[in-house]
Image (cartoon, grey):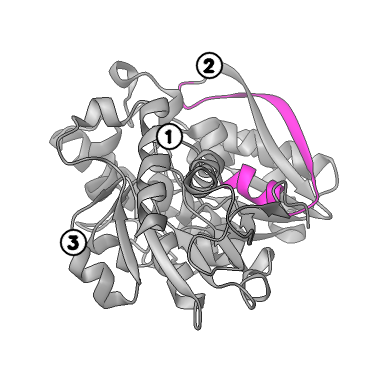
Amino acid sequence: MDRKNDGLRLMDGAGYKKIIIACDSYKGCLSSREVNEAIASGVKEWNADAASPEIITLEMSDGGEGMLDAFLSAMKGERVRIHAHDALMRWIEAEYGIVDDTAIIEIAQTAGLALIEPEQRNPMKATSWGVGEMIMNAYRRGVRRFIVGLGGSATSDCGIGMLKAMGDDWKKIRRECSFVLASDVTNPLCGENGAAHVFAPQKGADAKMVQMLDDRARKFAEVSAKHFGYDRSEAPGAGAAGGLGYAFLQYFNAEARPGAELLLNEIGFDALILDADLVITGEGHSDRQTLMGKLPQRILEHVTNQKIWLVSGGVSDRKAMLDAGFDRVVQVTPEEMPLDEAMKPEVARNNIIKVIREQFAL
C-alpha cells in the first residue's frame, strides 16, 4: 500500500498516539488530499513542541470526482492518460488507472459536469461516448475487471453514447469482463425518482427536457428488455450518472456497491484504525443526507473504540450528527463568511487550519 503521508509525525493534541484523517473532497473547493493536509497542518501548528502521535492521511471518494486519485493513492497502480471526448464530443485528455488486472474508471474524467461550462450544459446533447473510449482503451490493454465510479456526470443518455463508442465490441466485453460500480445512488432509471427527474435539472434540463429524457430512457429500457429478456431499469443504482448505471447493469451484468465502502475495503481501513485513538472525517457540507450512506457515515460505521470527529465546510444539523455517533462536529466556515469567499481554496484551507488549532486547544 502506497500512502504518501505514512509516518508523518505530529504533536499530541490530547493524549492521542495515532490519528487517521480520511475526508472527502470539499467539492468545487479542495480535493480530499488538500483537505486532509490542511487538517494535519492545523494539528501541527497548534503546538509543535508537544509529544508526537502518528498521523495517517487517506484520500477518500464515494465514487465521484477524485475517485481515481483516491484509489491510486491507496493502491500500487499505473495512471494511463489518453485522448478522449468530453460530454460535448470535444477532444480532451483523460486518465484512468490500472491496478494489477483491474481498471479504475472515473466517468467524470470524460463525461464530467465540471468539464462543461455552465452555459453549455445540456443533457439532451451530452453523451457518455468518452466513457466507452476509456473502457475500450483498457480492454485493448488486456484488462478484464473494472471498477467504475459513477459520480459527477453531465449526461442523461442512459449509457447509449458509451455503448456506441464500443461498437460491436460491447458483446465481447459483456462475455469477457466484470464490472463493479462505485456509487451511492440507489435511484431507478425512470419515473419521478429516476435519473431525469432527480438529476437532470442539476445538469441544465428544464421541465420539458426532463420529461423528454425520462420518455427516452423508458423507451430504451423497453427495447433493451426485449433484447435480453430481463429488465434492470428498476434495479437500485440504474439511475446513477444519468442512466449509465442502467447500461452497466443491463448490458454488462455489473454489481453495484457503495463507492466509499469499496475504497475502505480496498485500503484495509479496519486494520488501519485498530490502534488509532482518533479518526477525523468530513465533507463539503454535512446535513441529514450525510447519514444516508455518504462517506462520513460509512466511516462512522467502521469506527468502534476510537473517537471520531466530523469536520465539514458547513453543518446544517449538528444534533443529528452527534446523535448518530460523531464525538465532535466541527464547522469550518465562520457563520458570517459569504459562501463565495469561503469557497476560495486558500480561504478554505486557512479556515480548516484555524478551526483545527482551536479544536485541539479545547
Q: Is residue 15 left or right of residue 282?
A: right
Q: State the CA–CA distance, disc 1 to disc 2.
A: 33 Å
Closer mark to the observer between disc 1 and disc 2: 1
| Dot placed on the residue nearer the N-terminal end, 1 or 2 | 2
At 21% across and 70% down in the image, what residue appears? 320
Quadrant of the drawing holding the C terminus: bottom left
Residue 80's spot in the image, x, y percent? 76, 34
> Which residue is denoted by mark 2 in the rendering?
90
- Provide the secondary structure element on which disc 3 rests: loop
> Which residue is denoted by mark 1 in the rendering?
349
At 56% across and 33% down in the image, what residue appears? 109
User: Which amino acid type is marked by label 2?
Assistant: Arg
Residue 263's spot in the image, x, y percent? 60, 61
Q: Is residue 257 something one can see in this rendering?
A: no
| Dot placed on the residue nearer the N-terminal end, 3 or 1 | 3
The reply to whether discs 3 and 1 touch (Cβ–Cβ < 8 Å) is no
At 45% across and 59% down in the image, what residue appears? 281
| Dot placed on the residue nearer the N-terminal end, 2 or 3 | 2
Q: State the CA–CA distance, disc 2 to disc 3.
A: 42 Å
Q: Determine the image quadrant of residue 347.
A: top left
> Residue 339 lies in magenta, yes or no?
no
User: Which amino acid type is marked by label 1?
Assistant: Arg
**Residues in magenta?**
67-88
- Provide the secondary structure element on which disc 1 rests: helix
